Image: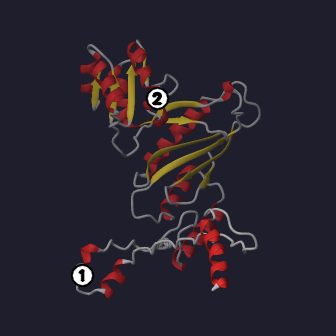
Amino acid sequence: MAKKQADKPDETKEKSAPAGEQPAGAETKKPRAAKAKAPKAEAAPAATVESASPGAPSAAAPPAAPAPTAPAAPAKKKGRQPGKPPHRGKKLLNKLKNDRQKILKAGAPPLKQAIALLKQIKRAKFDETVEVHMSLGIDTTQSDQMIRGSVPLPHGLGKVKRVVVFCQGDNIAKAKEAGADFAGGDELVEKVQKEGWLDFDVALATQDMMGKVSRLGKVLGPRGLMPTPKAGTVITAGQDVAQAVREQKAGKVEYRADKGGNVHAGVGKISFPDDKLAANITAFVEQIRAAKPAGVKGHYVKSITIAGTMTPGIPVTM
């Protein structure tokens, strides 16, 4: 009994001790670390939800995102590829070889023989344009040696040109009577400037209209349609408007030397009779010879070559 009574005061002391203090000799307990909460499980995809509960409506589950697809490889185009010449058959290769041999055998024939040879080696089904190529001994870096102008051909080009004339007053009626497709003043200038109208092949302008037509340089210049005195498309005060229109409709050819000192121009169709083709070529060559600059030294005309649209060139002696 005495032992029980002696033990009771100790229990009361332990009970009466403050909650924050521990009795001497008692083991200190380490504080427990807070457990990390596991992240909530994401919602299962629509396919899993539907398979788990077949009776549930499909609208309750969010739609599944489409899987990314790899870009499809570009399909190879059939036919002619850029930068590669078209395939030539054995028959065509043999014809081209025979044509070259004929040209080498003929050398540099006179004009009439060259025209006859040109018609022999023709192979295209359409009516080819006959072109003249002249190599000139000019220095294109010198401004006084630039060759530019126009020449009326006796028998035309074989195609109809659409001619517009920028003029005013009585010249409008004269131009239309001579065969101009369009003729007018301010209204035509505004139509080209505002609407971008370019439904013509040759543009002529009288000298009094050049102040207004010069505003169309950005539109007509890049297309080679800007009237200029060097090309003969500006009608001066002493010239006849009707005559200028008739020359353009008949077939007036413009020429200009390129950076290599060469002049090229179309002078008719291969279906023309030989004498008409010869007359057109002669008129063009004589015009180029007459336009020889004073500063040229040595040979002025180095070579003359005629060719069709789809034929090799034939050197000519003239």
- Closest to the observer, 263 or 3: 3
Q: Which residue is mark 2?
A: 218
Q: Residue at x 24, y 20 (%)?
A: 173
Q: Which mark is residue 72?
A: none
- Closest to the observer, 310 or 154: 310
Q: Name the residue type under label 1.
A: Ala
- Vertical order, 205 against 276 (above or below): above
Across and down, in percent, residue 258 comes to: 62, 39
Across and down, in percent, residue 172 comes to: 27, 20
Quarter occupied by residue 57:
bottom left
- Vertical order, 16 against 41 (above or below): above
Q: Residue at x 28, y 22 (%)?
A: 187
Q: Is residue 32 left or right of residue 282?
A: right
Q: Name the residue type under label 2.
A: Lys
- Vertical order, 68 against 148 (above or below): below
Q: Is residue 293 left or right of residue 210?
A: right
Quarter occupied by residue 24:
bottom right
